[in-house]
Structure formats: C-alpha cells, structure tokens
Amino acid sequence: MPEVQDQAEILLNYKGLANESIDYQIAYDTISQYFKDLAAIKPNLKETSILTTGGIIVFSTNKNLQGKYQPLGSTTTYFTSEKNNFKPTFYTSPITGKTGITFATPILEESGSRIGVISITLDLKEVDNLIRERTGLGESGETYLVGRLERKNSFIVSNRADTEKYPEGISSLGIDTATEGQNGAGLYLNYDGVPVIGVYRWLEQQNLALLAEISQQEAFAPAQQLARNILLIGLSSAGLLLIGVYLLSRRITQPIRKITDAAIQLAVGDLNHKAPVLSQDEIGILARAFNQMAEQLRDSFTALEKNNQELEIRVKERTAELVTAKETAEIANKTKGKFIANMSHELRTPLNAILGYAKILQRDDDLRPKQIEGLTIIKQSGTHLLTLINDILDFSKIEASKMEIYPTDLHFPTFLEGVVGIIHMRAIEKKILFNHELGYNLPTSIRGDGKRLRQVLLNLLNNAVKFTPQGKVTLRVSVIDNVDALFATSLPEKNVTIRFEVIDTGVGISSSELDKIFQAFEQVGDTEQRSGGTGLGLAISKQLVELMGGQLKVESELGKGSNFWFELTLDVVETASEAEHDISGKVLNYKGKQRRILVVDDQPENRLLLLNMLEPLGFEVVTAENGQQGVTIATEYRPDLILTDLFMPVQTGFTMVTVLREMPAINDVPIIALSASAFSVVMAETQRIGCDAFLSKPIEEEELLALLEQYLQLEWVYQ
C-alpha cells in the first residue's frame, strides 16, 4: 500500500546514521504504528519485516531480528512463480527446527525496480490448537496435519521439531495415501509403528493432509473384553453341552455365531452392522453390548468428520487473502502488457512519418553529399529505434506466453535469396566477405512461419556481421534427413529436417559467457565490442526457434569466431508462389490511366506522408479523417483502391470496411489496412472483415508499391 511503500522506501534507501535522521525516525515510527494496528486485527501474524534485496532486515516487529539476514527453507523463496492453483508454501525453520510459513512481496520504485521485500511469518499455533483440542478420541486419539516439506512428509505444527527423531520424514499408510491426494479410513501402523484406526483426508487447496487416529488397543478393548466373556461362558457351559448338546446347541451356538459375525464385521470397519438380539439372557446382553459399542464408534467417527469439515472451512478462510494477492498480480501483468502495446503503437506513429519522409527526401536528385549523409543517418536511426520497439514487443509477448507461430506456404529459394540480399549489402558496408552455401537438395516449397524464420536468421547474421571486424560470415542451409521426401513434393504430408548454420570468424565468446548469451538483456564480450541494442535479440531468437520446434545452439572460441545453428522439421508442400512483388530501382510513374486512391487516417502527418509518397508517382489521392468520412468519400469518388488506418475516432477502420463490403457498388474495391498495432489478432480481424492486405507502420515504400502493383495491375516506369 502507498503508506507502507513510501515509508519502507525511506528505510531501505537511507544510508546515514539512522538514529540521527528525523526523516528516518518518522518513517520508522509511522511504519511501526501501522504494523502494530495490523497485528491487532490479524493476531495470527507472528512477525512482519522489511528486508533489503539481499535479505538483510531493516525493520521488524520482532526487534531482535533487525540488522540480521533472514534465512528461509530450501522450498521457500521470496517470490513465488505464477500458478493456476495458488497453495501455501511451508518449510522447516533452520533456526528453531519447527514448521513455519512465510509470505513475501517485492517493494518497487516508481520505475518498477525492486528495492526491497516485505515478509510476513504466520503463527501456526492457532491451527495447531484447533485440530488437537477436543478430539473426542479417548486417551490415545490424535489429530494432526502433514505437509510435504523439502521432499519429505513432516508435521505441520507449532510446538514440535521432529527433524532429529524423523530425519527421513514421517510415513504411514494413512500419511502416504493422503499425500497422494486420496481420502479414506482403515487399520494400519502409524508413524511410530503403533497399530491404529485412522481416518485421512487430503485438503487439495491447502496442499495438506489431515489425519485422525486412535490406537487399535484402546478402540478394540471392549471387543476384547467381550471375547474373554464369551470364552468364560463357553468354558462354563461345556459341562452342560456334554449333557444336552442337541437341545442346547441351537439356543447357544446360533446367537454366538451371530455375535461372532458382528465382531468380524466390526473388526473390518463395518460400523453399521448390528448383532441380532435373540434372547434376554447373557447372549442377548452381549449382543446389545456389541450394538452399543458399534453405535459409540459411529458417533465418534461422525463427530470426527464434522470436526474435519469445520477445520477445512477455517483453513480456507485463512488462505483467502492469498487468492486476492494472486488476482492482484494477474491484473498487474495485464496492465503491463497493455502499457507496452500502447507505447509500441504511439512510437510507431511518429516513426512512420520520420522514415517515410526520409525515404521521400532521398528521391531528390539535387541533394548534396552532406544532406544525403544526414538523411541516411535519420533513416538508420529510425530503423534502429523500430528494431528496439519490435524486440521489446516480441519479448513481452513471449514473456506472457502470447507469441504464436503462423505457418504459410513459402517458396524456399526466394525466401533465402531475400535474406542473403539483405546481409550481403551489410557485409559490403562492413568490408567483410559473406558466403552462402545452400544444399543442392533443398526443397522448393515448404510450410513454415516465414516472418519468424526470417527474423531469427537476420538476427543471427546481423550479430555475426556486427562482431566480425575482419574475415568472413557464412550462411549454410542443408538437409540432414528425410531425403526421399524432397522428391515427392506432390505429397503434402511429407516433411524434411533442415539445418540452418551461421558461422563467423569474429571475436568469439568465452566459455564462461556462453551460458549467458541467451538470457534477456545480456550483452557479453568487452564493452568496446558491444553495440547498441536491447540485449533481447538472442533471447527472442531462442524462444522463436523453440516455438517452431527446434533448439538454438552455439559453439564458440574466444578470438576465433562462433557457430550458431538450429534444426527445424518442416512440411514439404506442392508449389508456393515464387516471390512477393519486388520493386527494384527508382519508380518514376506507371503506365495506363490515372488511378485514384482514398487515404483514411485520423493523423494529419500520416495522410500528408502518403499524399507526398503517391502523388509524385501519378496517383490522384483523396483523404478522409475517419471511417465515417471514408464511407462518404468512397461512395462519391469511387476510388480504385483504399488505404485505411484501423483505430480512429468517430468511426473505426473496422466499421468502415464492414460497411463498404456491404455496398454493392464498391464492395470489390481493394482495401489495404494500415496500423501501428501489428498484433496477430489485429491482422486476423482485418482478414475476417474483408481487407485484402495488411501493412504495419512505419510503412515501407517498397512493400506499399508492391501491393499497389498487385491489386491495381500496374506496370511501373523506372528511372
């Protein structure tokens, strides 16, 4: 809470002499009073502490702990991982040897950085007293909780430490069965080897086993006494049986047999079985005694079951706050994801104008060298910023488990040529040699996520070029198995395993840093050899390769270079389109009649950018500020093609496209969606409502012209 966080931040950040600081003392007194009030309404809080990120206690309701390091059991950490079913974590205290439970939550600055921890230790005495008092199970009766602590079963109590007595944990048929998630009752040896009658129950949400037991000796004492009485009666009646065995056998043996059956049923746990009372003599008294004993046992077990249910309800009430804490954490994660998505959209919008106008200005043939250099720097810086934004967005998707793979049919040689062409130009700029070795038996058409595969390859190749001061970089693509499938492309169910390798002769990576290169925000190597970036490239590449069904691996030697590789098993398909439309060279105009294009965008700079990009090429461009204007202008001017943003005031692009597709006069006009929200769900929605294509902002001129060529059937005139 804010009042706790503000005062805790003062205690954690203050570096001076605490006793001589007024601010420190005020913060100390304020937070002491707050936790004192909290303890008054939550008496089961044993102690509350504020710790540094290193585990040193700077404040505690137990003053003896201040300034000390707070150790926890090996199964407990300061931060629990996210789980669907949140359960308490118990541990054995390394100080007292007794069972304990501690919860902790981070204290964050406004920037989101962790500066400390608040920990709360609960007092288990209340639960301990609740389950042990008033059991109603006689002198040997016992009820207790068992939990799984450090890979062994231990008592969950506040007043006993059994580590020395039970170094391997406690075990019995009831304990083992209950901790496996089962409920029941039976006769068995308890954890001390004593024969008992026990009832056990697994409390799923509390991750605990509840047991109630009574020794068999005490439970069956009445039965044993009755058995002795039966024996005495039988011996005393032996003489009479010798005289009148026939006459008395039916009157004596039949009731005894019934009582014996009742004793057997009682011994195996059938407490509802009754012995029939056939006479008013000693046998009848014996039968009634049996029935009375069985009824008492039934009442005892009924009372025990009722106590179990009441105990379960109370334990659930104690853990309700943990559920609230989990829900709060989930809301925070969703807020973080929404913030990153909104920031990505807001940053892409100005980048669209920056990169677009840099490209337009570069068309001018009268530019001086200094101007060309400046525009190049602007474009490179904008592209670098866009890469950082994409990396952070991709990492947030992976972190939230929302990254998905969308396989499509790819013309594999053309796909590889595109990757090679990009890296070849960068290698020339770096003045190093770039080779690509493509296997002779590579398939012509495959099915895979071309966007993510290209992202991984370009990431690895860019790193190789970046960290190779001189020498060469090699891209090697080869088939390693399923060779027969390559010559059966007419059978779509065939697949092939392809190995992708990126080899360089650069600076290499030391063996001590190899384990860190795939971690987020890590950049290994000397500071002088690192370059700008988020440190997310290899972490994202590793996750993407795993999503596609492979594993990214590396071999490297410091000073001699590195070899990154991964293998993917991909489906071989019949025939994919050879390539997307390629716009090479400087486009001046197009042949044929003038085409009219409607641009719909609520941002003036985006409308002006497309106007300046398309009018010099001979297009007639009309603009609209929102979807409602777009419908009106499209109806009046009948454009040949529509370029529309998606998220706009008054009326969104989604609504506008839906309306246009229901108008017979213009429902066949090609519509290309433009958006800074390049999420898969947005792309899928544009396809559903009827858009012909999707372009993410910042808009690449070559991609836009390629789509115009495709949907307007244009023939370009080049310089």
Image (tube, rainbow, N blue to C red):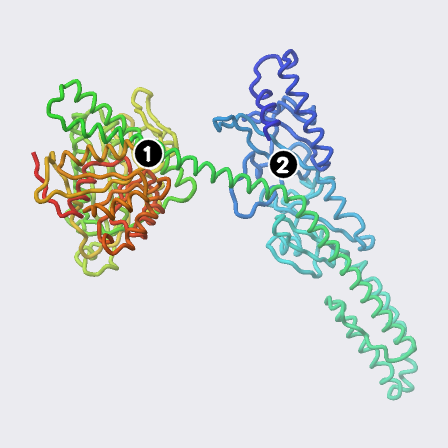
| Quadrant of the image containing the C terminus | top left
Q: Mark 1 points at which residue?
A: 537
x and y, in percent, of residue 667 in the image: 25, 53
The image quarter in which residue 702 lies: top left
Q: Which residue lies furthest to the bottom in this view?
A: 246
x and y, in percent, of residue 249 in the image: 86, 84
Question: Which secondary structure lies at badge 1?
Answer: helix
- Say which amino acid is labelled 1: Gly
Left or right, 459 with reference to 441: right
User: How far apart are the two marked residues, 2 and 1, measured between alpha carbons?
Assistant: 38 Å
Q: Which residue is drawn at 73% across and 52% down?
A: 310
Q: Which residue is drawn at 39% across and 33% down?
A: 343
Left or right, 697 with reference to 149: left
x and y, in percent, of residue 530 in the image: 31, 24
Left or right, 473 with reference to 303: left
Q: Mark 2 points at which residue?
A: 102
Which circle marks residue 99 in the picture? none
Question: Which secondary structure lies at badge 2?
Answer: strand
Q: Using a 10 Å C-alpha cutoff, classify the residue at mark 2 as few (fewer than 14 neighbours), some (14 to 19) or many (20 or more).
A: many
Q: Residue at x 21, y 35 (%)?
A: 611
x and y, in percent, of residue 619 in the image: 15, 39
- Say which amino acid is labelled 2: Thr
